[in-house]
Amino acid sequence: MYNFDEIRNRKDTFSTKWNAHASDDIIALWIADMDFPAPKEVAEAIKSRMDHEIFGYTLIDDEFYNVFIAWMKKRYNFVVKREHIVTTSCVVASLGIAIASFASKDDGVLVMPPVYPPFLDLPRLQGLRRVDVPLIHEENENTYKIDFDLFEEKAKEAKIFILCSPHNPVGRVWTHDELKRMADIIIKNDMIVLSDEIHSDIIMPGYKHLPMGSISEVLNERLVSIYAPNKTFNIPGMPTSYNIIPNKELRDKFTNTLQSLGLTGQSITSTLASKAAYKYGEKWFDEVLDYIHKNYLFVCEYLKENIPNVKISKVEGTYLAWLDFRALSLGDAELKDFLLNKAKVNLKSGSDFDSINGLCFMRFNMATSRLVIKDALDRIKNAIEGLK
């Protein structure tokens, strides 16, 4: 049994999450990493290698691929071929490389906001047209669904579709019917799909992640599936990414772009961390997932009993809660200031995910000690009471 209630001080560890503000009294729940130590085998593998004291260029061995392939087979019964995998330094790099490989200036890139900010930024930064298909907020059911009529219409304008599966930040785990309908539209419109599945392991009880690569053999000819151990095992500071590209022509284009930018190679720590995590981390992960699920239930119950005017979307996957603060009648900028400077809680602003429909929403990271979560919610509750 692992002790996930333990609170470890992450200040002065070069932590993006906890050192974003100079003030020591801010609770940081904004960026998507966990406050839990990674599986002990990860640290042991790195410590053992550091004792050698020679840190030359790193050769990725077969085990680096085999442990990932075995994980995918065991967790999803999804068979990945070694020759289909191209590695990069991280998922965002993979998205940028894929867009640069497959799109030309002014091509359309379809996204479904509210969504992870790089999905919104990368097309613009590469001189492409972003094609938005906003998700429909089903407020009565506290969830989101795809506007398939709009999706089908806008697909005609796009060369690439970036899928977030499970969806960050709204927590949807897409069903087989939803994925199949997306696939049919993608094929019909001769699009390429980039499926970011970095959160695929973090699925709440009662739901099941389906790899996009398992939906259709025809779709696989126009699919890049992007996976990483970073979220699953809390090793984003030692990032890597496995990109599954069955179509050789697409794979060659992707690899050529990777090489042309000089972005090949992996670090020693990323290689060792990935191998150890996939090889030895399953028990740790199963326990941390159970803890996160209980955190989610705790947040739901706390909001219902203590802050009923703050709504939480149903979390089917990821460890991220999507909170609706609109009932407070604060402006978006005012809400940000209120939470940070009055409640002393740093959350990720919803407007970063959607500048229109994300206003007055916040993303709340639940992958931390329940004691920290309670403290944060107590602070928000007390600050809201101070508004009355």
Image (spheres, rainbow, N blue to C red):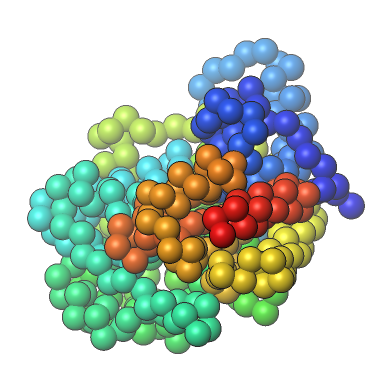
Q: Up-down: is 75 above or below 118?
A: below
Q: Residue at x 24, y 80 (%)?
A: 150
Check the image and report above or below for 284 versus 204. Answer: above
Left or right of 276 on screen, residue 361: left
In the rendering, at what x and y percent does residue 252 appear? Answer: 29, 50
Taking the view exactly as shown, the residue that stands out farthest to the right is 1
Residue at 44% in and 82% down: 138
What is the x, y in percent for residue 179? 42, 79
Residue 55: x %, y % from top left: 59, 17
Q: Position of residue 254 (x, y in %)?
A: 30, 48
Residue 260 visible in this rendered orientation of the protein: yes
The residue sitting at the left extreme is 106
In this rendered view, identify the residue nearer to me: 108 or 183.
108
Relative to residue 67, is residue 193 drawn left or right? left
Quadrant location of the C terminus? Answer: bottom right
Q: Residue at x 63, y 13 (%)?
A: 54
* Nearest the eye: 221 or 298: 298
Name of the residue lying farthest toward the front: 388
The residue shown at (73%, 31%) is 9
Residue 28 appears in the figure: no
Q: Nearer the viewer, residue 367 or 185?
A: 367
Q: Quadrant of residue 209?
A: bottom right
Quadrant of residue 23 in the image?
Answer: top right
The residue lying toward the viewer, choosing from 320 and 219, is 320
Q: In the rendered view, tell whether residue 172 sits above or below residue 168.
A: below
